[in-house]
Amino acid sequence: MSRKSRNKPLSKVITIYCEGESEVAYFKMLGRKYRKLKTIHTDKVEVKSLDANGISILEEAYRQESNKGKKSEEVYVAFDRDDMRDDEVARCVNYANKRGDKILFSSISFEIWILLHFEEVGRQYTNEQLTKKLSGKKYFGTNYAKFKGNSYDKFLYDKVTDAKKNGDKLLKCNANLISDNPYTNISSEIGNIFQTEIF
């Protein structure tokens, strides 16, 4: 009888359904980073853009999972608050909890998580303010609105440790997904998704 290797990666499929191309580009960068560092223990982390938000992205993720031949063992749905009211966000949380899906949520937008790669965040921003700030020389040095969806490797690949630290610090102060702004819970989930403690 042959022994199974203890070091063999788990046969686990994780799917991240994203609101837009920025999230897709970012999570694909993390996939490349952790495969290269050989810290990833999943056979596959699939990242898909659904071009939807709020309850509709959760419903579409459910539809896509239902139509798969082999369903994902874990499903994450990444989206932003944008203009959703508290009751709409609460509805999304309840829907995800009933399905067993996990939400990767940012208020006001995913760019708050991107900013955490460069600095701590303790104040609210509008989408316009975040775009303007990230366009600055200290950050992307280009029109960030036009950059979104391109490869983040050059800018963020070596800054994930900072984002994790800054994100965890933000979550200690702003832990309420429904009402807090700024808020993002991505720092609490990337270790689970990519099975790593090295950021």
Image (cartoon, rainbow, N blue to C red):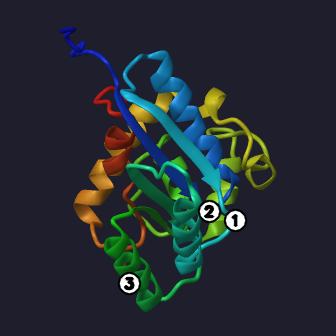
User: At which x and y percent is residue 99?
Assistant: 37, 70
Residue ID at (45%, 64%)? 105
Q: Quadrant of the N terminus?
A: top left
Is residue 179 in view from this perspective? no
Q: CA distance from mark 3 to mark 1?
A: 21 Å
SS class, disc 2: loop
Q: Nearer the viewer, residue 77 or 136?
A: 77
Q: Residue 19, labelled with which disc?
A: 2
Q: Earlier in the sequence, mark 3 or mark 2?
A: 2
User: At which x and y percent is residue 7?
Assistant: 26, 15
12 displayed left or right of 113: left
Residue ID at (54%, 68%)? 80
Q: Residue 27, labelled with which disc?
A: none
Residue ID at (49%, 61%)? 77
Q: Which residue is mark 3?
A: 90
Q: Earlier in the sequence, mark 1 or mark 2?
A: 2
Q: CA distance from mark 1 to mark 2?
A: 5 Å
Q: Tell whether label 2 touches label 1 (CB within 8 Å).
A: yes
Quadrant location of residue 142? top right
User: At which x and y percent is residue 93?
Assistant: 37, 76
Quadrant location of residue 49? bottom right
SS class, disc 3: helix
| Outermost residue, front side | 1
Q: Earlier in the sequence, mark 3 or mark 1?
A: 1
Q: Which residue is mark 1?
A: 51
172 displayed left or right of 96: left
Identify the amino acid type marked 2.
Answer: Glu
Q: Quadrant of the C terminus?
A: top left
Is residue 75 in view from this perspective? yes
Q: Residue 32, relative to residue 56: is it above or below?
A: above
User: At which x and y percent is residue 64?
Assistant: 59, 62
Q: Residue 11, relative to residue 90: is it above or below?
A: above
